[in-house]
Amino acid sequence: MRRAAVAVAAGAMAVSLAACGSAKESGDKADSSGSAKKGDDIKVGLLLPENATARYEKFDRVLIEKKVKELTDGKGKVEYANAKQDASTQNQQVDAMVTNKVDVLIVDAVDSKAIAGSVKKAKDAGIPVVAYDRLAEGPIDAYTSFDNVTVGKTQGEALLKALGDKAKDGQIVMMNGSSTDPNAAQFKQGAHSVLDGKVKIGREYDTKEWKPENANSNMEGAISALGKDKIVGVYSANDGMAGGIITALKGAGIADIPVTGQDAELAGVQRIVTGEQYMSVYKPYPQEADVAAEMAVALAQGKSLDSIAKDKVDSPTTKAVPSVLVPVVSLTKDNIKDTVIKDGIYTVNEICTGKYKAACDKIGLK
């Protein structure tokens, strides 16, 4: 983990959500999970879904581990596993965590439905479960993520702004995320609520496993079907897929059309600097990670979530789950300084490496 990203958790991002109090301040009221009260010597199981997207290993894992240590005076431990986009592997990882008798689980599900049985298995073993980033099914105790419908709306609004009058005449391609990810459906919902009736959607895809290579193949198919002169923009649900899409556009000789993204990955930010990608959605991972850690520590210690989670969210299987939804920001070349650089996610030097320096200079990123 880069020094800058670690500094975020301790510095600027310590200014957490107003609703987000320390686990040690959340009271001693026992949680409905039935977890016995414990001290700081706890084991937190952390299960993340994949490692192809840069955020999980570079941000989420490190930030959660750091916050757990902070909340437990260095006594709490995090047992970590990454499913590498395999739902069966993640179910086996839950089994291992249950066998190892962790005190609480933080789970970012590969497949929100497939994980339900494992969540129940953990609960039956007296282990509370925090759904992280994706709303897992089953008897979860808490949930933190971003407002995913708003993410889609933010992307759609940015794309319409970039298109201007071209929205009336041309067609766009929609490259949604994986059908197994409930977040992808919400991004799609939000985007459609903005785009429908404002621009013609020539082709639309649900992209298997969010893989850039699958987005690339889909985009090549869309270009072949629609014709390269008919496409005026692309809705891409995240930055990784945007990379594959832009490669397909370049291969077809298509340039200067807006492509959206999400996650503010370094490669995505660099493409925004050069103009190859129009925007991304910056999601302050340190806030989300801090909330997840606070929820997990409180649940492991048998404490109430009342001072942490002020909202409730319904999953398909569980009603009124205590939740915190973190706000998002539309990231363009105009606000790179005020977002990912200001928050310490990246430095100017990390973004403006050799081949990007001239473009950085042009937009005043020095």
Image (cartoon, rainbow, N blue to C red):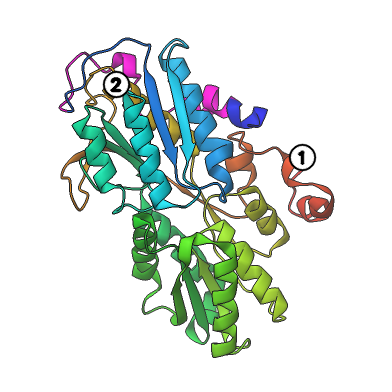
Front tag of 1 and 2: 2
- Label 1 to label 2: alpha-carbon separation: 40 Å
Location of the C terminus (image quadrant): top right
Which image quadrant for residue 19?
Answer: top left
Q: Give the left or right position of residue 314, taking residue 245 as reference.
A: left
The x and y percentages for residue 135 are 31, 47
Q: Give the left or right position of residue 334, taking residue 313 as reference.
A: right
Please check the rendered image and state whether residue 31 is part of the magenta-colored stretch, yes or no. yes
The x and y percentages for residue 151 are 42, 55
Highlighted magenta segment, given as a residue range: 7-32
Location of the N terminus (image quadrant): top right
Taking the image as drawn, is residue 17 in sight? no
- Mark 2 neighbour class, 10 Å CA radius: few under 14, some 14 to 19, many 20 or more: many
Pointer 1 residue: 349
Decide: is 149 above or below 348: below
Pointer 2 residue: 300
- Mark 1 neighbour class, 10 Å CA radius: few under 14, some 14 to 19, many 20 or more: few
* Camera-nearest residue between 38 and 357: 38
Q: How many marks overall?
A: 2
Decide: is 342 above or below 73: below
* Camera-nearest residue between 83 and 244: 83
Please check the rendered image and state whether residue 299 is part of the magenta-colored stretch, yes or no. no
Q: Which comes before the other along the chain, label 1 or label 2?
A: 2
Look at 53% across and 85% down and name the residue there.
170
* Camera-nearest residue between 350 and 75: 75
For the residue marked with disc 2, what is the amino acid?
Ala
For the residue marked with disc 1, what is the amino acid?
Asn
